[in-house]
Image: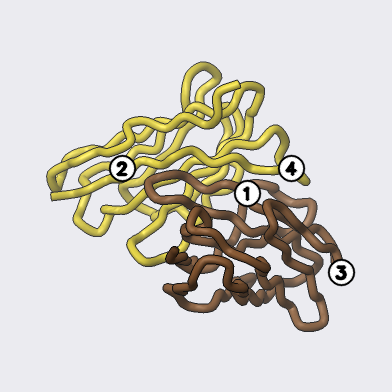
Chain colours: A yellow, B brown
Amino acid sequence: NAGVMQNPRHLVRRRGQEARLRCSPMKGHSHVYWYRQLPEEGLKFMVYLQKENIIDESGMPKERFSAEFPKEGPSILRIQQVVRGDSAAYFCASSLRGQNTEAFFGQGTRLTVV
Amino acid sequence: GNSVTQMEGPVTLSEEAFLTINCTYTATGYPSLFWYVQYPGEGLQLLLKATKADDKGSNKGFEATYRKETTSFHLEKGSVQVSDSAVYFCALSDRGNQGGKLIFGQGTELSVKP
């Protein structure tokens, strides 16, 4: 039973380009969470999605960032027109249910904006 | 709002030394509390958890007790090993609500020397 799979593991983008980060949840999990970890900081919640729905996006920047979790395929975190401040590790977690349940984390995507 | 505060690192110990990493929290209601561990280049793994006051979570020789009166969840281990070198994150979630939406502390880096 594969864990949460994120790809790519490392992504380098020039300022102004788009970054697409993918997350395949554990088998049977329909709840996905995205977190950002800035250097020397803890993880900060960004968005919580269930299949085809955004449940909570209270941690998402208002501009340039979007997330989706389609009926088929992985969840995608999309960052448009990246800036140097977007450089961070982005972690995805998935859970079986939305409440009273453990979240399992992927290995993260390390985004570097040059 | 809810928050988690951890002792600052890095913490450097000799093998077989006693470990304490302090964690205090601010929350309304009755949160669940967690310790996650992040080994170099990897994602977060759940180390232990406690879901109500006076519960003790334990795993791999690590322990933490949910203390409501002091709003604390300190991590302890009696005898650390080199393989315990990692970053440790304390986290909380609103009990019964959005199990994967977690609030993390800033992390404490532990380095164990032989």
The 10 Å Cα crowd at callout 2, few under 14, some 14 to 19, many 20 or more, is many
Q: Are marks 2 and 4 in contact (CB under 8 Å)?
A: no
Residue type indicated by callout 4: Thr
Do discs 1 and 3 belong to a common subunit? yes
Ranked by sequence position, the earlier of labels 1 and 3 is 1
Residue B46 marker: 1
The 10 Å Cα crowd at callout 3, few under 14, some 14 to 19, many 20 or more, is some
Q: Which residue is mark 2?
A: A79
The 10 Å Cα crowd at callout 1, few under 14, some 14 to 19, many 20 or more, is some
Residue type indicated by callout 3: Asp
Do discs 2 and 3 belong to a common subunit? no
Do discs 4 and 3 belong to a common subunit? no
Q: Which residue is mark 3?
A: B54
Residue A101 marker: 4
Ranked by sequence position, the earlier of labels 2 and 4 is 2
Mark 2 to mark 3: distance in Å?
43 Å
Do discs 2 and 1 belong to a common subunit? no
Q: Secondary structure at mark 3?
A: loop
